[in-house]
Image: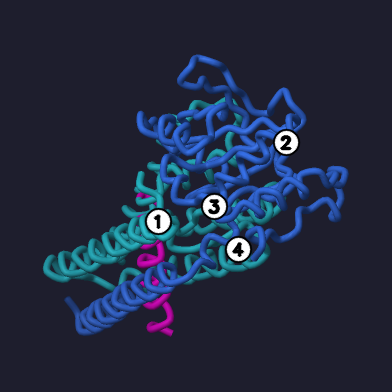
Amino acid sequence: MDLIFLGAKAGLAVLLLVAGGAKVADLPGFTAAVALFAPSRLPRRLLRAAALALATTELALGGASLAAPSAGWLNLAVLALGCGFVAVSGAGYALHRDRSCRCFGALSQRRFDAAAIARAVVIAALAVLAAQPARAASVQLGLTARLLLLGCAAIVSVAAYTAARAIAAARDAQIGWSS
Amino acid sequence: MSGMAATGAILFIVVAIAACAAAVLAILGTAQLAMSGPAAIERDGLARGERAPAWSLRAADGAGHRSPPARPLQLIIFADHSLKSFPSVVDGLRQLRDQDPAVEIVVLLRKRSEMAEPVLRLIGLEGIPVLAGSAALYADYNVRVGPFAIFVDSAGRVRASSLVNHGWQIAKLRQLADVPLLPAGGRSARPPRRRLAGA
């Protein structure tokens, strides 16, 4: 059971790091996805700021979850984010079915469909599992371990960012664009 | 730190590092797959029947152009001066420009380019306005690569959308653009899964 709890916690943290890094790499694309749920007259810069805020929140929560697993408020924040994913997936399915959700930037072609709702529910369920305060309190890390895991978090997010940028650039190059 | 807490910490570190390693491997694998095939762009663009973004832009000569268009149909070509590398597409555009006055053709750049208009004029696309768009506008159209063609009707609905590499694909999309849209609402009105023209 401990392994499931720890796996859920670490897995969620890594998922947030990958999603956040890839979204930052494709900010115009993710801004367009955010715009699907915003009033049509909202200025573009506000949408972009909201998209950037969401992506950096994912990065921050992912990094903090890895480096400070015993912090109870972090678990609740991740749980809230997971519930948010379910709500957005449901709304996307109802209002913008088959439009790209840009959940992982250029790393994936995920869309607002039934599978997206199922994935969001699984993420929320993992967040519920990882939010057990008694188990979280049993994982106390020292400074060295925190730094080590922060380093791992940085590697994962930079890898996601770089890969997403490379995929986008390769798509352009394949077709022969020079811009 | 108690023995139990220490065990929990060590276990968490091991699991977290394993998760990070698995994520990096998955990212590398995804990148390799994505860069080795065209499937990733299969669903770019907007589906038939979807509402297209509305905009109003000025060409280099100062003339204003907008979408939805005043004419029955507007063909938006997402490209830049590298369109010269697709002579068949250029032929298809020339043919459409000369033979179909119902269609307004515009070339939408991802960003301002001094080179694009002279080059496009040089390859025979004079008379087709070249508009400076933005990465954000491209994202609104869900277009990442080019040359990409989207037909929009005067009501602002997408009539046809695809990556194009040959002139006949332009002609095929033009034919598709003439097919009436199903009425909005109801499950049957959902646009079908799109394919690249000719794919």
Chain painted cyan: A
Dot 3: chain letter: A
Q: Quadrant of residue A38?
A: top right
Query: Which numbered dot is residue B182?
Result: none
Q: Nearer the viewer, mark 1 or mark 3?
A: 1
Which secondary structure is most common in the magenta stretch? Answer: helix
Q: Say whether disc 1 or disc 3 marks the residue closer to the N-terminus.
A: 3
Numbered-mark total: 4
Query: Could you tell me which residue is drawn at 50 percent across and 29 percent down?
Result: B130
Tell me where the magenta segment starts and ends, as one range: A1-24
Question: Quarter holding the C terminus of chain A?
Answer: top left
Cα distance between the residues tagged 1 and 3: 27 Å
Which hue belongs to chain B?
blue
Q: Tell whether A170 sits left or right of A151.
A: right
Marks 4 & 3 on one chain: yes
Query: Which numbered dot is residue A84?
Result: 3
Q: Are marks 4 and 2 in contact (CB under 8 Å)?
A: no
Residue at the spot of label 2: B99
Q: Tell whether A12 sits left or right of B191.
A: left
Query: Could you tell me which residue is drawn at 44 percent across and 30 percent down?
Result: B117
Q: Mark 4 is on which residue type? A: Ala
Q: Mark 1 is on which residue type? A: Ala
Residue at the spot of label 4: A116
Above or below B3: residue B94:
above
Marks 2 & 1 on one chain: no
Residue at the spot of label 1: A168
Cα distance between the residues tagged 2 and 3: 51 Å
Q: Secondary structure at mark 3?
A: helix
- Furthest-left residue in this view: A144
Q: Are marks 2 and 1 in contact (CB under 8 Å)?
A: no
Cα distance between the residues tagged 2 and 1: 36 Å
